[in-house]
Amino acid sequence: MIPLLFTAVIRKVINKIINKKINQVISPVISILLVLFFGAVPAYAVTDIAPLPQPVSNNAVALVQSNQHTYLLSFTGLGKGKDYQDVHNKAWAINLSSPNAQWQAINPVPHVASLAGRLASIAIGINDKAYVFGGYTVAENHDEISTIDNYQYSINNNQYTRIADMPVAVDDTTAASYQQRYIYLFGGWHNDGNINLVQVYDTQTNTWAQASPMPAPAVFGQAVGMVGNKLVLCDGVTVQANINARRSYQASHVCLYGEINPDNHLRIDWQLLPHYSVAANIEASQSQTTESSANQSIVNSVESNTVTTATAHYRMAATGIKTATGGQIVFLGGSDNPYNYSGIGYNGHPSEPSSYGYRFDLATKQWLTPFELPQPSMDHRALVCWQNHLLRVGGMLGHQQVSQQVLTTPLSTGQSCTQ
């Protein structure tokens, strides 16, 4: 009896060892086949992305890819104290392709100014490189100076390379890339005022050029999204001159549609769009209304001064996404009360984030029905799309609370990321 029992135990152990060895060989093969046939498989649910090491707002954010790994990057920004001392040049990265990944500190962003920290920089990821542009420093006396230096960051060696300075140094600009080569900076603030320039950086030649300027009042804190050669840019803040009084800052409820000329990347055909808040009010996308009559209704509403009821949002998160019919530009959050970097409005009132998202359909050239966000947020520099989810990295939540969360918003059926 005992020998038989012993033999059975030995057989069971041997079978476990054999099965374990088979699994060790087969599992990697299966993983490789899945990647080859279906692309990279996410290491974990998108909603499980770890929080940032510390709260940060007004940070530049980019997504890069290297060796079949996807990295989310955060550069510079404002800490939870929201004072000039909390402006920093820290940077972090998280490998989204690694199970249970955590954010890791990477080399801080270099600087040529005497102050290291900067706010309102912008970043764009192209392949395995991230490009960090502009921003401004904040001194103890609250003097703010736009920075001239820009950098290319390589995730492969954790090093920055200084690239050509902008012709006009800007902060609080908004950016988009075209053909995985050109990076467009739309407007922004330059030391003492806004500019309406469109500055284009060529990542292959390390040179700058000017594209068709924006035919609208110059703004800072605006948001833009692009799909292919089509883009939509909305809102921001204008500077208003006052008689016998200091200048003031006013929200700009202006949206522009632009098409980049396929034969000349510096030519942009600009058109004025109805504002999303006005378009939503008149329900231009109702099924029984034709596109032409809907657009005429929008025009009539604008001409009858309902545009004065439009509500603009400052520092929204925006990006472009793909759809079966072409694409959409998505805007999330922001605040209807423009504010200083502390989150307190220029009018002295605390600013609060919007809980709504807006989508512009490029095929029909119409605004779609607004949708509600489970978590309002503001003070964003970008909106990242990954694994069919929109990511808001850091920013401010209610009561001007600086966040370390990565907020996720799933795309709807038929929508997907452009990269």
Image (tube, grey):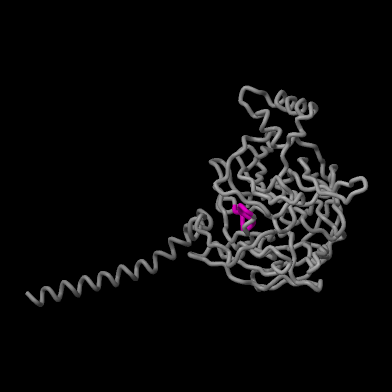
User: Is residue 292 located in the magenta-colored stretch of the structure?
Assistant: no
Left or right: residue 221 versus residue 284 is right
Quadrant in the rendering for residue 4: bottom left
Q: Is residue 242 above or below residue 169?
A: above
Left or right: residue 275 versus residue 167 is left
- Residue 336 in sight here: yes
Instruction: Give the magenta range.
Output: 391-399
User: Is residue 396 located in the magenta-colored stretch of the structure?
Assistant: yes
- Identify which residue is drawn at 75% across, 65% down: 118
Give the image location of residue 20, x and y in percent: 33, 69
Quadrant in the rendering for residue 168: bottom right
Give the image location of residue 405, x and y in percent: 57, 59
- Identify which residue is drawn at 64% across, 35% down: 368
Q: Quadrant of the N terminus?
A: bottom left
Q: Nearer the viewer, residue 384 or 50?
A: 50
Give the image location of residue 305, x and y in percent: 79, 29
Q: Nearer the viewer, residue 192 or 172?
A: 192
- Identify which residue is drawn at 59% across, 53% down: 391
- Identify which residue is drawn at 70% across, 47% down: 225
Give the image location of residue 55, x and y in percent: 61, 63
